Amino acid sequence: ELVALGAEVGLSASALKQALVEERMRVVLPEERGILASLAGPATFVATRVVQGEPREILAKLHTAMDVEENLREVRRFPDRVVWGPRGGFAAALRSLTRLDGRGFPLSNADEVSAMAVATESGRVHVRLEARLNGRRAGAAQSASIGLVSGLGFLAVALALNTMLPVALGVLGLVSGSSAYVARKNYRRDAHLAQLALEQALDRLEFGEPKKRALFSGG
């Protein structure tokens, strides 16, 4: 009915269908607030793309990619959406140890990764990938907290030994500050790699698998 109404006011069917799909795919993420979001950054990462194909075919390709390239397992499946989670166990650890290309499995740090594929018009699909790293961010906060507690413990011992207060406070600041810095830096690195992995998955859908060079090629 909306398509027919759009035609009456001069809107093309393809343009109207595209707008309807984009509205369906649009998800307004809540603005993150609090200490974790302020210090470490967001925990949800999204990538979208319009690619050639059919929804079922696209989700099948993504499932293979998440299994092979990201070491994830399927958690739930819906008609137009699939959710994956960490594989876990000995098999997952073994695959991580035997991957020798240096890339690793960036999305294995996510609590869950999901994909939605909706047809926009004949032969084109709007794809939306999302990764949630809440657990990884909480782990970074815990590491920073351990550094702070360690610093406070040193401060208490230093004061008990009558160490000069400025020296004790300096050590406290150094220990807690360096711990927070390292935790934040490591989380930002993992978050960047997760976002990059989402974009790379969409690149493979749009442009195909990259050609792999032979190990002992002369070129």
Image (cartoon, grey):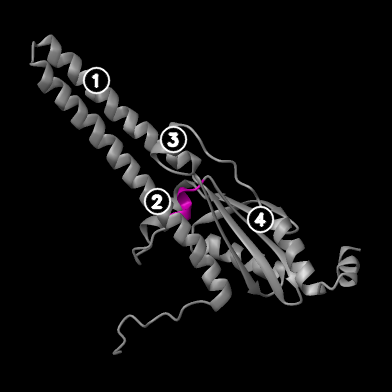
Query: Pointer 4: what residue?
Result: 82
Mark 3 or mark 1, whichever is nearer to me: 3
| Mark before the other along the chain sequence, 4 or 1 | 4
Q: Is residue 195 above or below residue 28?
A: below
Q: Earlier in the sequence, mark 3 or mark 1?
A: 3
Give, as a three-letter code, the residue at label 2: Asp
- Is residue 107 inside the magenta stretch? yes
Discs 2/4, front: 2
The amino acid marked with disc number 3 is Leu
Residue 187 percent coordinates (x, y)? 38, 45
Residue that mark 3 sits on: 36
Instruction: Give SS at disc 2.
Output: helix
Q: Secondary structure at mark 1?
A: helix
Q: Are marks 3 and 4 in contact (CB under 8 Å)?
A: no
- Left or right: where does residue 32 sit relative to residue 162? right
* Residue plotted at (36% across, 83% down): 214
Q: Is residue 91 visible?
A: no
Mark 3 → mark 2, Cα distance in angstroms: 15 Å
Percent across and percent down for residue 111 are 53, 44
Residue denoted by label 1: 152
Q: Are marks 3 and 2 in contact (CB under 8 Å)?
A: no
**Mark 2 touches mark 4? (CB < 8 Å):** no
What residue is shown at x 43% (from left), y 32% (from top)? 35
